[in-house]
């Protein structure tokens, strides 16, 4: 008798009431909860990370009294600054156009480069596993290389201006964009693609006619999303010499013109919020268009609705009299709308390229400088820095990221839940929470850090608080979105048995969203480690300070060594996150 | 070899196809002559779709030979395979139009094998092929919908667009995989009538899979019954009655689940007859 046989046997016997007379209680007969060693290991790691995070928070020593005390400093400081000042309106407009333009060109460059990478990385389009691994490796590598480090290298190869920034943004953004593009390709409906193959279409034709139209809305949304992130990140590029608002701000701070520096910071903040609102409007308009889509099941259930939605005016329109007259596409209101939107999009892109004033010659001449510059960066060495001090600084950066992530968790869970349609007690509460999230997300972490450095002084404290606050905007939004995506059935079932709103939330909504929650938290940690590096550049503590020092002192082999250290750390966290997602699936 | 055999456009010989441990086709043989209208009849999972997909080179047989339009399909690659596919139109149960493209653009994708390189948007196609596509749309009665998104059409309309797309290929053979399984009775009738009409006009050879016995008898010239991937019935419809087909079907249905499915089929068919 096999184990399975005896199990079914026991089950059969257990069915009759007589069989229960054996004296074994239900608790004894109930199967033991299965234990997977991988899950235990993952859970322990998770607990350990949270504990480390809490310890890190304690180490950073964020004390409320000290904050209140330094608030006095801040007031003194502000009094000394004597109010905000701004560049002349003409200059300001130019700087804004330049910053937005170079960010947009960089993001678009990344989008273009990401298409082939995503095609190779998506499981349903890749020509082979080797290609797939290579494409994913490029994604992970470009994501792990901070854009500010790329900018440092490019500033050496190109004359100052926008090109180093565009290339840095363009290369760094490939990581996220190609990942999201590939995910979208993997989620398409394979049917239309198969139909094109069945009609004799080539691979390229399958892609252009069967896949691209399906993924385009999601791709555009990804690019807009990344563009927002890059705009916030562009501030730090100014610190390493990329033209735009960031550079102007760093000059102001270096010349101790705090009023002007903070004024520009305010402009950047407003710009980021406006951009966020514009791109969410564009995304909304695109999704609204998609809403007309009804699944075929809908159409079978309500066939008349379908024909109503499609109902043309009674009788044929004049253009449809014959195939010959129909060759010219009629100018319907929808076509006019689409054409206008298309023309605006093209104008914005062309405008961005124009204001970026790209020095195209640089693209040719830099190849000559490449070996020379590359030689400066190799071999990696910590130079006159002590290796143990470097590792200590890296540890501090990781601690900042962990502490910030732990501090972010609860507030984002709260705000994110309130912002989810199926959890929010009222639409007013939901609207407020969403608005708050957009506002927080709009603040570039760097601006926050600079302001905090002013208030709390140099050090890890400013970095942790800046990252923790900035994180709420991102994590809160991700949590809200994944809660809205859970299956509504279980929630309805619990309401039906009389559970309260809170009980429904804890027993139906959270259990379904918990995987996504863990995934997003690791994404947050991942982002925070990279961001923590950069914050060091403005005095937020950690390894970034040494990075900037080494770069400004032209000790490029030290830059390489530090970057490799950061890269290794990021890859470890990325691997950990992948393992966690697998273990908690 | 007899004269009629050499006229066969489709010749399957002892085709077996396994997916892992399941056998989808088991030593299936079939010949279809020019101009024939054949229905593959069978329950779901009987191997109808797999057989059709072999005819278009979308599946490679585990054993046996597949000859379509004089070519050994499994040995074809690249350009040669795409050429063969362009001469074989395929109509799917779920229509498989690209939802976000216009109706006209969906029809035009049927001509892709005749052009080199990918096409983005309507301006990628020549005026002549646009005109041809519009003529096909006119023929299926949807000219006035040419510039609408395809997902704004009803199911029956979408299937007619799919037929226009297949016509765009100038096919010699038309394959249809349960073309009306997702449609209401009225649209089903329209679509089946349209396929028959077009087949007559263009002299197409048609292989169509169905699961409704009624419809198969009234529509096809010949019925091929499949069960567990084996051909268990191959007969001209002529004066065949439903009772006869059901009898053969009843005889070949051995498990209770199959008998139940056949019974349900009967009830469904009876209801359809009563309704019409």
Image: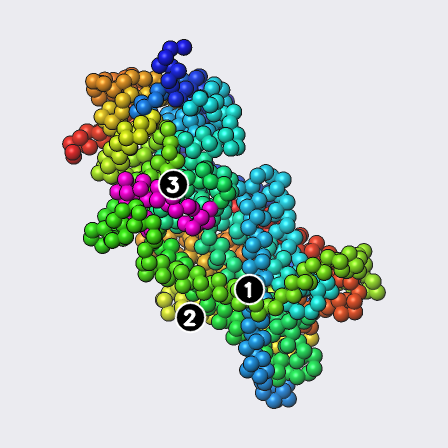
Question: Can residue A260 be seen at all in this image of the molecule?
Answer: yes
Chain for disc number 1: A
Assess disc 2: are there few (<14), some (14-19) or many (≥20) residues with their C-alpha within 10 Å of its C-alpha: some
Whole-number angstrom distance, CA of label 1 to CA of label 2: 30 Å
Mark 1 or mark 2: which comes first in sequence?
Answer: 1
**Residue A413, how many percent across, how many down?**
49, 62
Chain for disc number 3: B
Chain for disc number 2: A
Q: Which residue is tagged 2?
A: A432
Q: Which residues are magenta?
A: B119-148
In screen coordinates, is A461 left or right of B63?
A: right
Question: Can residue A396 be seen at all in this image of the molecule?
Answer: no
In screen coordinates, is A299 left or right of A278?
A: left
Judge if badges 3 and 1 mark residues of a common chain. no
Mark linked to residue A37: none
User: For this rendering, which residue is in front, B94 or A59?
Assistant: B94
């Amino acid at each position: 008798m096999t184990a399975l046989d005896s199990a079914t046997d026991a089950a059969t016997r257990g069915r009759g009431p007589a069989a229960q007379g054996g004296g074994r209680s239900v608790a004894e007969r109930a199967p033991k909860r299965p234990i997977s060693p991988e899950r235990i290991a993952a859970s322990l790691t998770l607990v350990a990370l949270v504990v480390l995070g809490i310890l890190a928070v304690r180490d950073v020593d964020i004390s409320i009294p000290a904050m209140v005390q330094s608030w006095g400093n801040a007031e003194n400081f502000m009094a000394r600054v004597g109010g905000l000042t701004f560049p002349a309106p003409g200059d300001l407009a130019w700087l804004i156009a330049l910053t937005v333009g170079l960010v947009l060109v960089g993001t678009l460059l990344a989008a273009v480069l990401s298409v082939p990478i995503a095609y190779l990385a998506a499981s349903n389009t890749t020509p082979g596993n080797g290609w797939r691994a290579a494409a994913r490796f490029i994604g992970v590598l470009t994501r792990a290389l901070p854009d500010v480090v790329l900018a440092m290298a490019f500033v050496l190869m190109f004359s100052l201006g926008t090109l180093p920034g565009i290339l840095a943004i363009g290369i760094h953004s490939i990581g996220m964009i190609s990942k999201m593009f590939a995910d979208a390709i993997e989620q398409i409906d394979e049917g239309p693609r198969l139909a094109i193959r069945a009609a004799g279409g080539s691979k390229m034709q399958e892609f252009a006619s069967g896949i691209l139209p399906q993924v385009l809305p999601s791709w555009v949304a990804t690019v807009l999303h990344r563009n927002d992130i890059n705009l916030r990140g562009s501030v730090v590029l100014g610190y390493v010499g990329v033209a735009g608002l960031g550079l102007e701000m760093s000059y102001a701070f270096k010349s101790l013109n705090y009023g002007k520096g903070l004024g520009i910071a305010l402009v950047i903040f407003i710009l980021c919020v406006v951009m966020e609102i514009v791109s969410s409007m564009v995304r909304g308009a695109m999704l609204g268009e998609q809403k007309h889509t009804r699944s075929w099941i809908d159409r079978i259930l309500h066939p008349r609705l379908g024909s109503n939605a499609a109902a043309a005016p009674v009788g044929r329109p004049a253009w449809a009299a014959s195939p010959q007259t129909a060759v010219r596409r009629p100018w319907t209101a929808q076509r006019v709308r689409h054409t206008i939107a298309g023309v605006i999009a093209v104008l914005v892109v062309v405008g961005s390229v124009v204001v970026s004033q790209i020095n195209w010659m640089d693209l040719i001449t830099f190849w000559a400088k490449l070996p020379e510059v590359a030689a400066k960066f190799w071999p990696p060495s910590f130079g006159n820095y002590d290796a143990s001090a470097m590792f200590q600084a890296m540890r501090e950066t990781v601690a900042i990221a962990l502490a910030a992530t732990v501090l972010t968790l609860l507030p984002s869970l709260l705000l994110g839940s309130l912002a989810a349609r199926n959890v929010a007690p009222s639409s007013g509460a939901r609207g407020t929470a969403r608005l708050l999230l957009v506002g927080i997300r709009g603040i570039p972490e760097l601006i926050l850090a600079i302001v905090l450095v002013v208030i709390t002084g140099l050090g890890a404290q400013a970095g942790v608080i800046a990252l923790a606050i900035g994180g709420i905007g991102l994590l809160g939004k991700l949590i809200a979105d994944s809660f809205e995506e859970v299956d509504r059935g279980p929630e309805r079932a619990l309401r039906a048995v009389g559970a309260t709103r809170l009980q429904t939330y804890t027993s139906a909504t959270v259990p379904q969203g918990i995987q996504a929650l863990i995934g997003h938290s690791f994404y947050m940690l991942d982002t925070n480690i990279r961001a923590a590096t950069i914050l060091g550049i403005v005095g937020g503590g950690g390894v970034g300070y040494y990075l900037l020092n080494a770069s400004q002192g032209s000790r490029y082999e030290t830059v390489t060594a530090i970057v490799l250290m950061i890269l290794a750390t990021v890859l470890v966290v990325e691997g950990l996150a992948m393992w966690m997602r697998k273990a908690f699936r | 070899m007899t004269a009629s055999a050499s006229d066969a456009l489709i010749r399957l010989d002892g085709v077996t196809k396994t997916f892992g441990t399941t056998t989808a086709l088991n030593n299936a043989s079939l010949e279809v002559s020019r101009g024939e209208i054949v229905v593959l009849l069978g329950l779901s999972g009987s191997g109808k779709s797999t057989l059709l997909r072999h005819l278009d080179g979308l599946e490679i047989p585990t054993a046996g030979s597949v000859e379509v339009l004089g070519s050994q399909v499994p040995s074809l690659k690249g350009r040669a395979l795409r050429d063969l596919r362009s001469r074989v139109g395929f109509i799917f149960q779920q229509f498989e139009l690209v939802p976000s493209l216009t109706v006209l653009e969906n029809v035009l994708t049927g001509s892709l094998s005749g052009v080199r390189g990918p096409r983005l948007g309507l301006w990628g196609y020549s005026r002549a092929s646009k005109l041809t596509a519009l003529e096909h749309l006119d023929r299926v009665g949807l000219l006035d919908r040419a510039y609408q998104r395809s997902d704004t059409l009803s199911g029956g309309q979408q299937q007619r667009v799919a037929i226009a797309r297949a016509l765009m290929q100038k096919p010699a053979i038309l394959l249809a995989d349960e073309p009306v399984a997702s449609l209401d009775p009225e649209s089903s009738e329209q679509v089946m009538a349209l396929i028959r009409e077009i087949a007559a006009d263009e002299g197409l050879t048609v292989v169509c899979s169905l699961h409704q016995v009624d419809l198969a008898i009234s529509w096809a010239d010949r019925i091929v019954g499949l069960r567990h991937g084996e051909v268990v019935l191959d007969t001209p419809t002529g004066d065949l009655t439903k009772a006869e087909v059901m009898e053969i079907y009843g005889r070949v249905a051995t498990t209770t689940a199959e008998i139940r499915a056949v019974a349900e089929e009967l009830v469904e068919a009876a209801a359809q007859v009563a309704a019409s």
